[in-house]
Amino acid sequence: MTASNRSPDSKHSPPVVVGITGASGAMYAIRLLQSLCQADIDVHVTVSPSGAAVIRQETGMAVNLQDLDLLKLVSFLPDWSSERHRAWVEQTDWRAAVQSRLHYHRHDDFLTPIASGSFRTRAMVVCPCSGSTMSAIARAAASNLISRAAEVHLKEHRKLVIVPRETPVSVLQLENMQRIAAAGGVVLPAAPGWYHGVDSLDSLLDFVVSRILDQLDVENHLIRRWKEDQ
């Protein structure tokens, strides 16, 4: 799996926060976590109960929100995954290093570091982002750690990327997207392009994750870019 190259200063960079909510598209979050781990970036993860339910439904993986096994989550690959993605997961030498870089926080724990603006972070990604989470972020109405951490990133003027997947969207959802964008957030719908040589489900998945990584300034080679090698 050649998702990303390790940057020389990645070990000294602040961590990335990843919030996983109840929209469909759990594999986008899993592939994002895999890519960040490969880039040697510390990741703080929080999952909503609805997010856990979607992971269970779409992957068959049971999720214990009291003590989530992030290593198990990062190791997951569906049956349709290509050999290039299996290569990294099937290795064993990455596990100890990755385990030290993954940090899990319960969705109802407001005393955790990522709930405070004084805890330095590189960026936050809500992937996938449900409509209810998007509404909470747009209106600064934090009811769990995910919406609170997102609110922190907006108030601290740090990069916040939300990845909505639901379609079609209502006028109210469009208004919430506009509010988040106006506050400095990036709205990045899970809408893969088809110009990069699509030949599998992995190609479509990697397109969206590659665009998220671009927003985080994480070098990656998940896709063949427009006009590249043409």
Image (tube, rainbow, N blue to C red):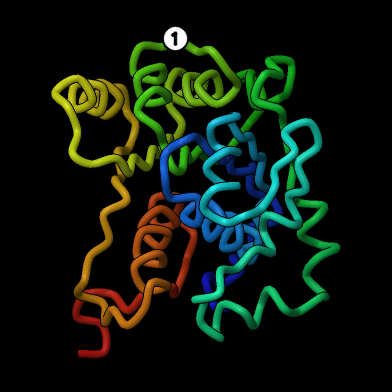
Q: Position of residue 201 (x, y in %)?
A: 38, 72
Q: Is residue 152 above or below residue 76?
A: above
Amino acid type assigned to the residue bearing label 1 in the image: Ala
Residue visible at 36% across and 78% down? Answer: 200
Name the side, left or right, on which 99 lies relative to 192.
Answer: right
**Quadrant of image for the C terminus:** bottom left
**Quadrant of image for the N terminus:** bottom right
Name the side, left or right, on which 116 lies relative to 167.
Answer: right
Q: Is residue 180 above or below residue 200?
A: above
Q: Position of residue 82 (x, y in %)?
A: 51, 82
Residue visible at 48% across and 22% down? Answer: 156
Tell me the element at label 1: loop
Residue found at the far left of this picture: 171
CA neighbours of label 1 inside 10 A, class few (<14), some (14 to 19), many (20+) = few
Q: Nearer the viewer, residue 190 or 116?
A: 190
Q: Nearer the viewer, residue 88 or 169?
A: 169
Q: Position of residue 180 (x, y in %)?
A: 30, 25
Residue visible at 26% across and 54% down? Answer: 191
The residue pinned by badge 1 equals 141
Residue visible at 44% across and 42% down? Answer: 128
Q: Position of residue 58 (x, y in %)?
A: 51, 53
Residue found at the far right of this picture: 96
